[in-house]
Image (cartoon, rainbow, N blue to C red):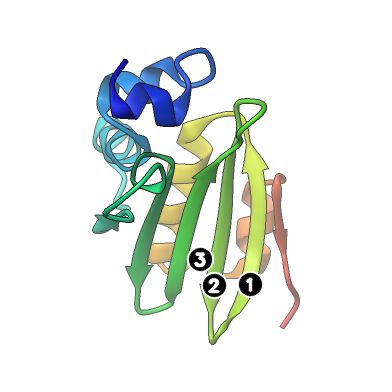
Amino acid sequence: MSDVSTALGVRLYPDLVERGGLAAALADCAALHQLDIGRLSAPENGRSRYTHAEMSCDRGVVRVGLGAEARYFMIDISGDGRVRAHGDTCDLLPIVQVVDAWRSGVDLSELAARFPFLKCKKD
């Protein structure tokens, strides 16, 4: 069994195993749907390099992780040194859509309206 399949679990994330991890799957999904998620980074070592991804822009940092016991994608949007929004969903596409919207300047209230799974902090 490869490092990526051990880290991700073939049962929960076979599509991510096939693509080589979360960051690669996010990039593929964004390209397929012509969305801009910017430059992705992932931890260099250990299991996290397959299960976590991060995108930075001038508005802040978006972090994405995976559920361990069930299939879901967790997202946190941070800016000004604090978490400004967070949520989770079972599908990868809404995560990519949130990142694209955030990078394009959509504010927190509009993000919450478009993506009901996202809980936004009030400023």
Expressed as whole percent of the image width and height from the top left, the position of residue 28 reads 26, 33
The circle on residue 106 is 3
Residue where numbered disc 2 is placed: 78
Which of the two labelled residues, at mark 1 and mark 2, occupies the earlier sequence position? 2
Determine whether the residue tagged by mark 3 lies in a helix, strand or loop: loop
10 Å neighbourhood of mark 2: few (<14), some, or many (≥20)? Answer: some
Instruction: State the quadrant of the C terminus.
Output: bottom right
In the rendered structure, are the residues bearing label 3 and label 1 in contact, judged by CB atoms less than 8 Å apart?
A: no
Q: Quadrant of residue 88?
A: top right
Residue where numbered disc 1 is placed: 84
Expressed as whole percent of the image width and height from the top left, the position of residue 59 reads 43, 77
Instruction: State the quadrant of the N terminus.
Output: top left
10 Å neighbourhood of mark 1: few (<14), some, or many (≥20)? Answer: some
Mark 1 belongs to which amino acid? Arg
In the depicted structure, whether residue 75 falls above or below residue 7: below
Mark 2 belongs to which amino acid? Ser
Q: Quadrant of residue 96?
A: top left
